[in-house]
Amino acid sequence: MLKPYVEGYYYIALDCSSSDPLDIHPIGYNTIAFTLNPQAVFKPDSGSDYNFNLSYHGYISKYISLIPLQAFIKMIVVSFTTNGASQLFGISQPELINQIIPIEDVISGSGTLKEKLEENMSCERKAISSIERWLLEQLPKKEPSRYAQNIDYACNLIQLRYGNIRIADLCLEVNMSQTNLEDHFKQMIGISPKHYCRIIRFIAVYRFILNNSHIDWSALVHRYNFFDQAHFIHDFKTFFGYSPSKIHLANAHLAKGLTLEI
C-alpha cells in the first residue's frame, strides 16, 4: 500500500570520529530521518545545533555541509518516491527546499510517532516498524491530485533521459501546457522542471564519476551535453561542494564508515 509513496527504509551507521563534515547533496527525492542518538548529532556549518532527532528533509537542490557532534551516529532514513512525500502528506513543497526541519513542524499528528521512536531507540528494526505503521496511517483519504500521474511521468522521463530533455518536448510527452506543468511540478516537487533536469543530469554525472576508475573529462563533458568544462565544474561544485576531480580522487575516503541496510 505504501509502494507508490515510499522507495525504501535504510539503517545508516556513520563513523564521525574524524569530525569531517557530512556532505549533503541532491539525491532526487525527499526523506525523513530519525537519529538513534539521544543528543543532538549535527549542526550546520553556521548556525545552531539540530536539537531534534526526527526530521523532514525537503528537496535538496544544492550542497549542504553538516558538522557532526557525535563520534558515531546511527539513523533510520525513509526515502520517498519522487512525488511520494507530496502525495502522502499533502505538503506544498516549494517552501521546504533545502530545509531540514523537525517533522512536527511539517506534518500534524507526528508527535505520537516521535514518542514511539524514542521508546525504540535501541532497536532499529522496531523503530522501522513504528515508522511504517505511522506511514500507513497517513495514506491519503481522498483521491490524489488529478495531475499527480502526469508529474510522476514527467519525472520518470527526465530520469530516463538523464535530464537531457527540452521542456517543450516534455510538455508534449505528458500532455500538459508549459504553464500547467511548471505550476504543478513546482507544487509537488518543489522546483521547476528545468531545475529538476539540471539536478538529475548532475546526479547521473556524480554516479558515473563514482563508478569509473578512469575518466576522460573532456569526453564526459561531451557525453552529458555540457556547454564547456569550466561551466560544468562550476555547476558541479554548486551541487556537490567539490570539483568532480576531487570527488573522483577522494571517493574511497568519502565513502569510508558508511553502511546501508535495507
Image (cartoon, grey):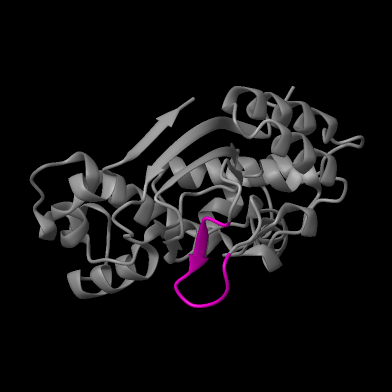
Q: Which residues are magenta?
A: 40-49
Question: Residue 191 vs residue 5: left or right?
Answer: left
Task: Out of 16 and 113, give the one closest to the viewer.
Answer: 16
Residue 188, percent from left and from top: 70, 54
In the image, farthest residue toward the right: 141
Residue 120 visible from this viewpoint: yes
Q: Quadrant of the N terminus?
A: top right
Question: Residue 107 vs residue 229: left or right?
Answer: right
Question: Residue 167 vs residue 92: left or right?
Answer: left
Residue found 28% across the figure and 55% down from its top = 18
Task: Out of 119 and 7, give the one closest to the viewer.
Answer: 119
Task: Out of 243 and 44, give the one closest to the viewer.
Answer: 44
Residue 208, percent from left and from top: 25, 45
Residue found 42% across the figure and 58% down from its top = 25
Task: Out of 260 and 4, give the one closest to the viewer.
Answer: 260
For the stretch drawn in magenta, the main secondary structure is loop
Q: Where is 51 relative to 75, above or below? A: below
* The stretch drawn in magenta includes residue 103: no
In the figure, residue 95 lies in which quadrant? bottom right
Q: Where is 125 relative to 178, above or below? A: above
How many labels sit on residues? Answer: 0
Residue 227 visible from this viewpoint: no
Residue 190, percent from left and from top: 64, 60
* The stretch drawn in magenta includes residue 46: yes
Q: Where is 243 relative to 222, above or below? A: below
Residue found 66% across the figure and 47% down from its top = 151
Residue 31, percent from left and from top: 60, 46
Residue found 64% across the figure and 50% down from its top = 53
